[in-house]
Image: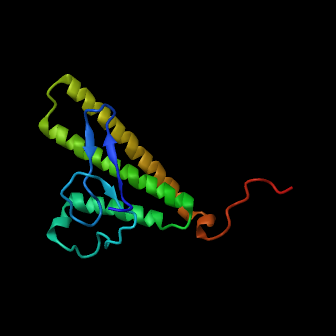
Amino acid sequence: MEGRQSHHVNSGDNSDTIDAPSIDSTTTTNNTATIDPTNTAAPASAEPESEASTTPSDIRLQRITDYLEEALAKASPLEANLGATNADLQLIAYRMKQALEEALQQGPATIADLEELERTLEQYIKITKQIDRFTQAAMKLAASPSAQGSKLPEVLPKS
């Protein structure tokens, strides 16, 4: 699969690795996270090709992919990279949420398990706060005159 990158999220200790399934438009049978920025699949708002791609999880992953593709298409390298990093964090946060839900459904067996869940939840909250900060920054950049096609403002005074 040329041009694709695999992303694996590790919760800190080597015991809990979260493998994300592919988020491109093809169906997969493995647990490898694949973000294909050149993916030309129709956005989630278009008619789905099959019933399999209509679960909330599939739709959410497709929306993250759509956001990434939209960000990378921006002319400004700053806006493109900010959006791409935000998409990466959104994927990490979503996978953490899935892991937390799975762990909560099983129920913590010990106090140590509960403490680990609390640490993971705290990390999830930190990531979502960073997503919010990146989103606010992206919105400000998009609204700025420099994003409307004018030159970047002068930083140094003219001599």
Rendering quarter of residue 43 = bottom left
Vertical position of residue 124 compared to residue 36: above or below: above
Q: Can you say which quadrant of the picture contains the N terminus?
A: bottom left
Q: Is residue 103 left or right of residue 4?
A: left
Give the color scheme: rainbow, by chain, secondary structure or one colour: rainbow
Vertical position of residue 34 compared to residue 125: above or below: below
Residue occupying the far top of the picture: 111
Q: Nearer the viewer, residue 9 or 132?
A: 9
Q: Can you say which quadrant of the picture contains the C terminus?
A: bottom right
Where's residue 120, x and y in %? 30, 35
Q: How many marks?
A: 0
Where's residue 85, x and y in %? 45, 52
Rendering quarter of residue 67 = bottom left
Residue in view at x 50 percent, y 60 percent? 80
Q: Nearer the viewer, residue 28 or 77?
A: 28
Rendering quarter of residue 146 = bottom right
Residue in view at x 39 percent, y 49 percent? 89
Residue occupying the far bottom of the picture: 47
Residue in view at x 14 percent, y 34 percent? 107
Residue occupying the far right of the picture: 159
Residue 139 seen in the current view: no
